[in-house]
Image (cartoon, grey):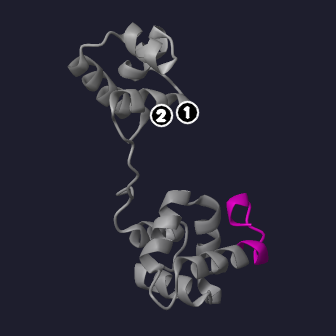
Amino acid sequence: MNLPQIGHAIRAQRISFGLSQQQLGDIAGLSRVTINQLENGTLDDLGYSKLNNVLDTLGITMETKEKKGHQHALALAAQTASTSYKAVLTPGMLKKILQSGDAPKQFEAHIMTLLDEAPTAIVLGAVKEAAAHDVPAKKIMKHLSKWARQWHANNPIWA
């Protein structure tokens, strides 16, 4: 759930209670303008404590759940890694490489492309898909970090 979606829920709940934006702002310790911007989705940022005050006032919770994200992240990651190369890295091969920590010489450039150019969300999705009971995501992340150091990846997230 993003801030505009939360703002929409806040507006609906505020109206159901018959509160004005000014009244809600007074109760939650915020200005009417801030409440208006929150409800209209034009507020760029609101700290957790302030947002939580508004939610608590209206009896709304903010639950966390896993984002659906990219489905078939291994396929997307393999495609991204193979874009500039003649040899194609398949999702199955990528999974095996991620799990084993052994990148065959012909796919080192593919893995480097993945580390430096692929969106982090896709790489993390691929890690999650590749993870298994005997090869947890944490171990795969160590493999990525090892390759990043070994091949001097530019993306500091893997260091």
Is 19 colored magenta in this rendering?
no
**What residue does disc 1 label?**
49
Per the image, label 2 sits on a secondary structure element best described as helix
Residue with the most extreme left position: 16
> Where in the figure is residue 130, as x and y percent of width and height?
45, 80
Q: Nearer the viewer, residue 118 or 20?
A: 20
> Where in the figure is residue 149, as x and y percent of width and height?
77, 73
* CA neighbours of label 1 inside 10 A, class few (<14), some (14 to 19), many (20+): few
What residue is rendered at 38% in x and 48% in y? 63
On residue 1, the disc is: none
User: Which quarter shows the C terminus?
Assistant: bottom right
What residue is rendered at 73% in x and 59% in y? 156
Q: Is residue 87 above or below residue 24?
A: below
What residue is rendered at 61% in x and 85% in y? 106
- The range drawn in magenta is 148-159
**What residue does disc 2 label?**
52
> Where in the figure is residue 59, as x and y percent of width and height?
33, 33
> Where in the figure is residue 24, as x and y percent of width and height?
39, 16
Any part of residue 155 in sight: no
* CA neighbours of label 2 inside 10 A, class few (<14), some (14 to 19), many (20+): some
Q: Is residue 72 above or below residue 18?
A: below
In-image side of 77 versus 62 (left or right): right
Any part of residue 122 in sight: yes
Quarter of image, res 18: top left
What's under tag 2, amino acid-wise? Asn
